[in-house]
Amino acid sequence: MSFTIRRATHEDKWGWLQLRQRLWPDAPIEYLSFDLDDKLADPDYAVFVASRGVEDLGAFVETGLRDHGEGCETSPVGYIEAWYVAEHLRGQKLGRELILAAEGWAREKGCREMASDTWLENEASITAHLKLGYVEVERLVHFAKRL
């Protein structure tokens, strides 16, 4: 049985949350779950899932609109906020199909550019972005100091 790429619904929240936990294993469940309903209801945010049914999600992408994206010249910009494919499903083009869905949504919202980010050490994500035609535009190191 193959996967279908579709917009997430409220019925997908549990499976989507489980995938979010895999993407951000150190984040508290309360943090990962607190705004799922808001994201599903926001007209400027879209969640797409790779599904073999409500209880069988294998991947997701969250995308939204931002006023600016590094390296972009237009506004608004479609932005890949989160993107995850279960490890055992990688290499089957599910990630590509999810990004194509997110890009199509951004085009429908009037965007002419799409942006994204990832951690500097996330070589798999960097490689996946490059394979999909994304170009690295800058690297950034964040700093913080407790006062």
Image (cartoon, grey):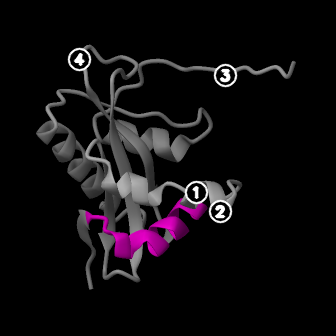
Dot 2 and dot 1 residues touching (CB under 8 Å): yes
**Residue 88 falls within the magenta-colored stretch:** no
The residue carrying mark 3 is 142
Q: Nearer the viewer, residue 61 or 11?
A: 11
Which label number is shown at residue 29?
2
- SS state under label 1: helix
How many numbered markers are drawn?
4
Where residue 139 appears, x then y in whole percent?
A: 54, 20
Q: Eyeballing the image, is 18 above or below 128?
A: below
Question: Which amino acid lies under the numbered mark 3 shown in the image of this protein?
Answer: His
Secondary structure found at label 2: helix
Q: Which amino acid does label 1 sit on?
A: Leu
- Say whether marks 1 and 3 touch (CB < 8 Å): no
Q: Name the residue under label 4.
A: 74
Q: In which quarter of the image is residue 28?
A: bottom right
Which amino acid, by three-letter code, is at mark 4? Thr
Of the two numbered discs 4 and 1 on the same chain, state the one appearing first in sequence.
1
* Mark 3 secondary-structure assignment: loop
| For the residues bearing labels 2 and 4, Cβ distance under 8 angstroms | no
